[in-house]
Image: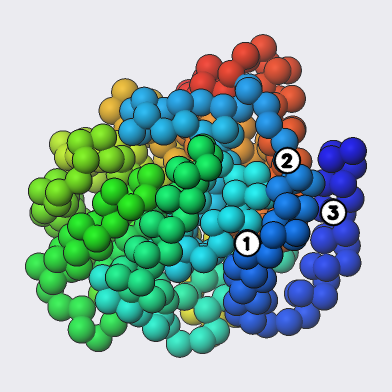
Amino acid sequence: MRYFFQLSASVIYQRIVKPILFKCSPDAVHDAMVRFAEFSGKNAPLRGFVDYSMKYDNAILAQKLDRFGGLEFTNPFGLGAGFDKNALTSVPIEGIGLSFATFGSTTARECQGNARPWFHRLPEYKSLMVNAGLANRGVDKVSKTVEEAYLRTIGKGSKFNVGLSIARTNDAFAADDTEGISDYATSLSKIAGKCAFVEVNISCPNTFKGEPFVDPKRLDMLLTTLDNVKRESDFPVTLKMPSDKTWDEFKALLDVIVKHNVQAVTIANLRKDRNGMDIDPTWKGNLSGKPTENTANNLIKQTYKEYGDKLLIFGLGGVFNAADAYEKILCGASLVEIVTVLMFKGPAIVPLMKRDLAKLLKRDGYSNISEAIGKGV
């Protein structure tokens, strides 16, 4: 019965709801989706309906990641940073069946973000052009909503893992590298222990100061400071990596990362290269979704091959179905983040992808997802 509802809900969204939404401004739709999700999380009957109708659990998808703070994940799917920068939607995100969410990115100071529009749709490429510029309420406010979500899940014994991405404030007050490092350290000090994990976003491409910490020497300076921020010894950290580096450049960053108190890397951030794509040159921003997929998968595979014994991998970019997620897992990702597919296929795609991924694992003779990680390398 649940499967029929989930399949029907997905079809209705794609054939009826999405065509209507896609006639509206993507900025307005995004803001409305966040507000509706926040409302649904506070509405008990609606929340109960979503929890029941979207439910799908299968032990083959569950894993405990000892190398990532011993956190348990009921399935590999989670929300990537960028959808909900202020951590307002943890209840419905858990309700649709994701096992974790990376909220944010948040910054030490409140940030208005870039000038609107923040988003442009590229349906022919299964992509969004993103230029939000880290708009968020600042870590003092966001840390409160994150902690509330974290304590809620702990209080009810949930295995839903609440994470927060932190970045450098994107405003005119951003100064030199010292100020940037202090910005990250402030955010980490205020959030450590108030969530399940932190993502350090060094690769947001739409900011006032660019990406100074994708330079190995600067990255080493940043991570040396973050190593000294007080936090529990098993509190896990992942780094959000750039997608526009050659392997040698990417490897130079990984060589720095493995020397520090970092347990994972998230591969990878938005694509900058527009070559081969017919895109309005006046549109600002960078690409999510399918255009990021091949580069991300290649970087995941290389990272797993050379650093799989040192770093766990969050796979991100272009996941639109279970086969896409499975490819990332075979390349070496332990967890898979999604964002863009929710706009294109709706929330019911989550339980459907979980069902299909379980079938793929069983088809190939695996008794648990952990057995499949990296088997394509």
User: How far across and down, in percent of the image, does residue 172 sit?
Assistant: 25, 86
State how far apart marks 3 and 1 are (Cα).
19 Å
**Looking at the figure, which quarter contains the N terminus?**
top right
Q: Residue at x 15, y 55 (%)?
A: 222
Residue at mark 2 to residue at mark 3: CA–CA distance:
13 Å
Q: Residues within 10 Å of mark 3 (few under 14, many from 20)?
A: some
In the image shown, does 70 or 61 lie closer to the viewer?
A: 70
Residue at the (73%, 17%) spot, across then down:
363
Q: Earlier in the sequence, mark 2 or mark 1?
A: 1
* Residue 121 location, quadrant: bottom right
Q: Which of 357 and 50 lies nearest the eye of the viewer?
A: 50
Would you say the residues marked 2 and 3 are in contact, meaning their CB atoms lie under 8 Å apart?
no
- Residue, disc 1: 41
Q: Earlier in the sequence, mark 2 or mark 3?
A: 3
Residue beneath label 3, please? 9
Residue 15 image point, x, y percent: 88, 62
Give x and y (percent) for residue 55: 73, 40
Residue 304 lies in what quarter of the image? top left
Image mark for residue 55: 2
The amino acid type found where label 1 is placed reads Gly
374 left or right of 50? left
Residue at horizontal 51%, vertical 21%?
370
From the viewer's perspective, is the residue at label 3 or at label 1 nearer? 1
Apparent side of residue 221 relative to residue 186 in the rendered image (left or right)? left
Q: Quadrant of residue 262?
A: top left
- Mark 2 lies on a secondary structure that is loop
